[in-house]
Amino acid sequence: MYNIPDGVWPTMITPYTEDNKIDYNCLEELIEWYIKKGVNGLFAVCQSSEMFFLSLDERVELARFVKKVTNGRIPVIASGHISESMEDQIYELKAMADTGIDALVLISGNLAPKGELDCTAKRNIETILKEIPDIPMGIYECPLPYKRIISPELLSWCASTGRFYFLKDTCRNISLIESKIESVKNTKLKIFNANAATLLETLKIGAAGYSGVMANFHPELYVWLIENWRTKQEEAQKLQHFLGLSSAIEYQLYPINAKYYLKLEGLDIRLKCRSRDMSLFDQSNEIEVEDLHYLSKAYSDSLNH
């Protein structure tokens, strides 16, 4: 029986060469950085990866490369269906499934048009499961094309199929997450919170871990929190305050700011992105990221001594 490990699942960013192609040398360096930081899995093709700005060939090769480099050390999941029609989405999903990834993640906003009821999403999920029968599945409440929050009822049905193992939850609501956790109790489907501010409280009620933007900055702090919150409650609460406040940097020029943080970590990565204008990342932005890097290193050192 397949199992998604609890813990930290970074939403991977994509490095580019000077001529705007995927920089696979840097990507390999980035994968090793994640693994050294202790993460439990990688979400390889997602919004952080700028999948809406990648061709299908690029999405497929990106997932295949990440799976190859990890070489079984940690599992790799990926999304990658960005088309409007269900027929085109299934074509994309089949291509992604053939890369060897451990699970295929469905974008919630692509399961039904905005305003449509759960029955439409359920019908489309049934079609996808029939067309792609052999790979574990997940769901990603991605902000694009619009944020569709999965209801506890639909989530319960997904779990009942036996095909779903992962939800990247972006609802930012502790009581709703609790309802979702209850709806999949005693099933294989695990819920990973993408919101740093609510993380500790959701771990206490049964969330399996964290899968979000901030694991591109200081994943080691999220690893420590998830591994230690039960036995070191006071330290965990203090760390939660730091992580919640630090996550405000998400609203800066992401993922450019994450790439700048990774440069400070010693990675040979360019700030180039396809979704954001690099020229808007100014000196003030740089200083804010430098401050976060300094404080994160100091916090990490204090936890390990």
Image (spheres, rainbow, N blue to C red):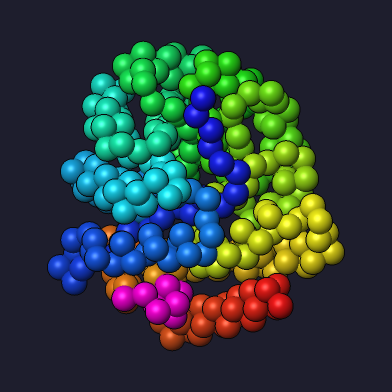
Q: Position of residue 62 (x, y in %)?
A: 27, 49
Q: Which residue sits at x=64%, y=74%?
A: 300
Q: Which residues are magenta?
A: 260-268
Q: Position of residue 244 (x, y in %)?
A: 68, 62
Q: Which residue sits at x=60%, y=34%?
A: 190
Which quadrant of the figure has residue 220? bottom right
* Above or below for 177 versus 135: below
222 falls in the magenta region:
no
* Above or below for 105 versus 58: above
Residue placed most toward the observer, 220 or 68: 68
* Above or below for 30 versus 278: above
Residue placed most toward the observer, 122 or 181: 181
Q: Which residue sits at x=55%, y=67%?
A: 218
Quadrant where the C terminus sits is bottom right
* Above or below for 116 versus 265: above
Which quadrant of the figure has residue 177? top right
Q: Position of residue 13 (x, y in %)?
A: 38, 58
Residue placed most toward the observer, 197 or 301: 301
185 relative position to 136: left or right: right
